Image: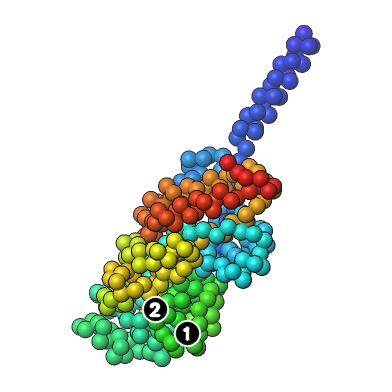
Amino acid sequence: MPRTKAILAAATALLALTACNSTKTTQLSGAGSSFVNPAMGRWTADYQQAHKNVQINYQSIGSGGGIQQVRAGTVDFGASDAALTDEQLAAMKPVLQMPESAGPVCITYNLPEVKQPLHLSPEALAGIFLGTIKNWQDPVIKDANPGANLPKSGISVIHRADSSGTSAIFTTYLAQVSKDWASKVGKGTQVNWPAGNGGKGSEGVTGQLRQTPGSIGYVELTYAQQNGLPIAAIENQSGHFVLPSPASTTAAINGFLNQLQQDPRLPIVNPPAGASEAYPISGLTFLIVPKDGTDVEKRQTLKNFIKYVVTDGQNVASSLNYAPLPDSVKQNDLNLLNQMTAQGKPLQ
């Protein structure tokens, strides 16, 4: 009898151990871009719903913060709207960098008197953010908005205060369309803004815009829509005033498709005049993933999650105002994913 009890006890312990192992949760952590946060929130929620033993925590702290945390090894992946340069890559342990989504940086404003979408030319945008266009009655703004009830008040500029890939997309655009901006300010995740006040993250910019009549700023499209903020139509190289949308972002991508096949880090701002329906302030967001790691199970889970993001997850992104990645870019991502390793060995 004691022997029988011992056997039963051993069997029970083995079953308990097996059950414990089968329900083990793999936790992934990521940080970075607030621009991609609405899509990332859906991707992580949907993936966790389908994979009950996976938990993914993504912190929307800005692209610069995400890059820093990948460099420090405190997260499993980062997200940045600014692609790492060759110099940055050389200063880090080997990472894989792949586009995960594409979306527009929209210009939003707090002008209750203006009932139709504000039209802004490249000259107007550069002047406003340089601080040389100071009033909503400036002729450069009025000429593009005939009949609009523009206020007789000053313009309050709101920009990102933190290191931001959204800022990198926007300042890359301004540097392309304005020689003054290129020489005086430049482009990057952080610049010395000539005018205005800063907000932390897209959330901070959105909050300040809602509280400041006569203000203007830039955020990801979903943030503006969720907060009921109006969105400006921006003049592209063909002379069309285009609103930001998944379709107009896709048109911007298509304007650079051949070049993107050679280098997916290429900016897609200010597309050529032939892309007549393109929104001119669009950008790709990049996942930044350490090429190697020690935890085999975690690395395999990360690879599976990223594969979902760049394939089936693109349909989810489309519903949140992001443009789906072109097939050629998705295939390039999948090829890069196959370079992920754990303890120096390939993953499945």
Is residue 268 shown above or below 344? below
Question: Which tag, 1 or 2, sits closer to the chain's start?
Answer: 1
Q: Which residue is mark 2?
A: 216
Residue 223, picture quadrant: bottom left
Is residue 308 shown above or below 273? above
Let me know if residue 237 appears in the view: yes
What secondary structure is found at the residue carrying circle 2?
A: strand
Position in image of residue 232 (x %, y %): 32, 74
Circles 1 and 2, Cβ within 8 Å, touching? The answer is: no
The residue under label 2 is which amino acid type?
A: Ile
Position in image of residue 240 (x %, y %): 26, 75
- Identified at 33% across, 86% down, the residue is 136
Alpha-carbon distance for marks 1 and 2? 21 Å
Residue 121: which numbered mark, if any?
none
Within 10 Å of disc 2 (Cα), the crowding (few <14, some 14-19, many 20+) is many
Within 10 Å of disc 1 (Cα), the crowding (few <14, some 14-19, many 20+) is some
- Quadrant containing the N terminus in the rendered view: top right
Q: Residue furthest top?
A: 1
Let me know if residue 208 appears in the view: no
What secondary structure is found at the residue carrying circle 1?
A: helix
Q: Which residue is mark 1?
A: 182
Foreground residue among 54 and 274: 274
Position in image of residue 215 (x %, y %): 39, 80
Frontmost of labels 1 and 2 is 1
- Identified at 39% across, 67% down, the residue is 256
Left/right placement of residue 218 relative to residue 199 reads left
- Quadrant containing the C terminus in the rendered view: top right
The residue under label 1 is which amino acid type?
A: Ala
Left/right placement of residue 8 relative to residue 275 reads right
Q: Residue furthest right?
A: 2
Left/right placement of residue 171 relative to residue 302 reads left
